[in-house]
């Protein structure tokens, strides 16, 4: 997207702060509705976690991170450096308020309520993405082969039954399949003693970076102006909101906060205190001509996905709570490499690695809806592991709010005022 050299004072109808997949899809939808939209982000649109994810439209991912099982094992999970869910020790003091909320949201009633709220949002994710991809000329990037959760032991496979029953009760299509069926579907995988859960309706983006390039092109073609500036502050005015951004004061009638993990300070300036914190996500990639898999596969006990991207295998995932400032953890990268090699021993040294930031809420629910201080500011962040999945859904909700159309769902579970 071409950057606009704007300084001084300027005005616009709607400013969208953040040009990840959430901000891009919101900007596209608003522009299509006839609004003048300016997009603020100092980084290349569609970079960050929007590029570095597992590429799965995970309409099956209805379970929150915090569950009773996680709560029972929370100390050992958080303080085990090799755990799929861990904490950077230096961030513990700052994270304590978030962790207390997370523990409360992991209790049975709260976890069940949060799962139902996630299920409501993801229910139409697949058709929404199919429509979006077709609209921007990127339908060829969608792979419709489903997704596997792998269970390496019989005990893990048996234990998965209760989890999958909960998902089925929330409307998710899933089949528990035998090791022989897994071997027929993915012959390059090593033999499993357990089996797998197969989500047949899952859709996979075999190149999230290319999808972001094509989405960015569609946003540019719709007339959205991108300012490569960081929003330093937002200030409510009588007739809108003023954004201060590196030599620019932008006066917008409406502002959409979609800055992902960087949204908390801006939300507070807008009048909303939200317990947003940061998960540091990682991936490593091996270039290869012949794919080792035909669909994403998650070794469930290891907490990462093996993703057959275009021309490469990506191992992506795990959760590290640790803020925005610290450098990447060599240990977390090494764990991903080790875990991938335990599945595919033929892998050599990876060709690249990456770290990005996920906006994480203690209840695993995004923040979507108007500010408690006034609807001239609309929140759209905190999607955690399902930001890619929920981008077109979030864009529709925001566009409906802007133009005072019925949203179609109860927004109460996602509002900033829930805290």
Image (tube, rainbow, N blue to C red):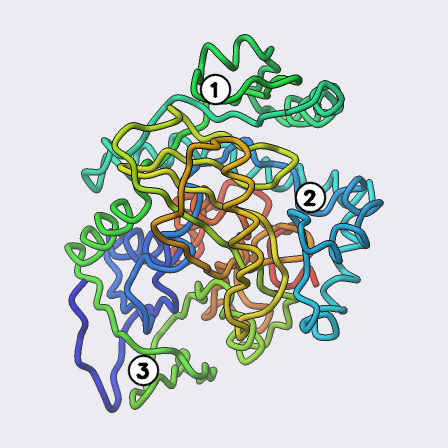
Residue tagged 3:
250
Q: Is residue 276 above or below residue 63?
A: below
Residue tagged 2:
114
| 72 displayed left or right of 213 | right
Residue 222, given in percent of the width and then of the height, sits at 18, 55
Please identify the quarter of the rendering in which residue 187 is found: top left
The residue mark sitting in front, 3 or 1, is: 1
Query: Dot 1: within a 10 Å radius of its alpha carbon, few (fewer than 14), some, or many (20 or more) residues?
Result: some
Quarter of the picture containing the C terminus is bottom right
Q: Secondary structure at mark 2?
A: helix
Residue tagged 1:
200
Numbered disc total: 3
Quarter of the picture containing the N terminus is bottom left
Q: Quick one: label 1 or label 2, which is nearer the N terminus?
A: 2
Instruction: Measure how far apart labels 3 and 2 are at the Cα level.
Output: 37 Å
The residue mark sitting in front, 1 or 2, is: 1
Question: What residue is shown at x 39% (from left), y 82% (from top)?
Answer: 243
Q: Is residue 377 above or below residue 140?
A: below
Residue 22, given in percent of the width and then of the height, sits at 40, 54
Tag 3–tag 1 contact (CB < 8 Å) = no
| 343 displayed left or right of 13 | right
Q: Quick one: label 3 or label 1, which is nearer the N terminus?
A: 1
């Amino acid at each position: 997207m071409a950057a606009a050299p704007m300084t001084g004072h300027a005005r616009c109808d709607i400013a969208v702060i953040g040009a990840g997949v959430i901000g891009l899809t919101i900007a596209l939808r608003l522009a299509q509705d006839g609004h003048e939209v300016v997009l603020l982000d100092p980084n290349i649109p569609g970079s960050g976690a929007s590029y570095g994810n597992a590429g799965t439209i995970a309409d099956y991912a209805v379970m929150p991170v915090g569950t009773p099982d996680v709560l029972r094992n929370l100390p050992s999970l958080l303080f085990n450096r090799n755990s799929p869910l861990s904490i950077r020790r230096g961030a513990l003091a700052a994270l304590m308020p978030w962790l207390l909320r997370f523990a409360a949201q992991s209790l049975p009633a709260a976890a069940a309520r949060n799962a139902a709220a996630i299920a409501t949002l993801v229910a139409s994710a697949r058709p929404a993405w199919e429509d979006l991809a077709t609209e921007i000329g990127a339908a060829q990037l969608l792979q419709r082969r489903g997704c596997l959760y792998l269970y390496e032991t019989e005990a893990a496979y048996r234990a998965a039954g209760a989890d999958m029953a909960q998902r089925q009760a929330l409307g998710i299509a899933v089949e528990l399949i035998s090791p022989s069926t897994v071997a027929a579907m993915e012959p390059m995988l090593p033999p499993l003693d357990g089996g797998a859960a197969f989500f047949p309706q899952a859709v996979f983006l075999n190149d999230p970076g290319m999808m972001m390039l094509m989405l960015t092109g569609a946003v540019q073609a719709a007339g959205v102006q991108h300012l490569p500036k960081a929003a330093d502050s937002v200030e409510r005015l009588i007739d809108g909101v003023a954004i201060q951004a590196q030599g620019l004061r932008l006066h917008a009638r409406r502002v959409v906060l979609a800055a992902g993990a960087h949204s908390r300070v801006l939300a507070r300036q807008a009048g909303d205190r939200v317990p947003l914190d940061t998960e540091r996500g990682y991936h490593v990639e091996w270039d290869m001509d012949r794919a080792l898999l035909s669909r994403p596969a998650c070794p469930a006990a290891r907490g990462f996905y093996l993703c057959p991207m275009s021309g490469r295998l990506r191992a992506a995932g795990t959760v590290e709570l640790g803020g925005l400032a610290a450098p990447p953890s060599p240990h977390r990268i090494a764990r991903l490499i080790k875990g991938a090699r335990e599945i595919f021993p033929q892998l050599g040294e990876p060709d690249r690695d990456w770290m990005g930031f996920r906006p994480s809420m203690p209840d695993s629910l995004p923040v979507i809806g108007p500010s408690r201080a006034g609807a001239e500011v609309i929140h759209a962040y905190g999607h955690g592991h399902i930001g890619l999945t929920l981008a077109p859904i979030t864009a529709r909700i925001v566009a409906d709010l802007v133009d005072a159309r019925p949203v179609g769902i109860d927004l109460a579970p996602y509002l900033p005022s829930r805290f």
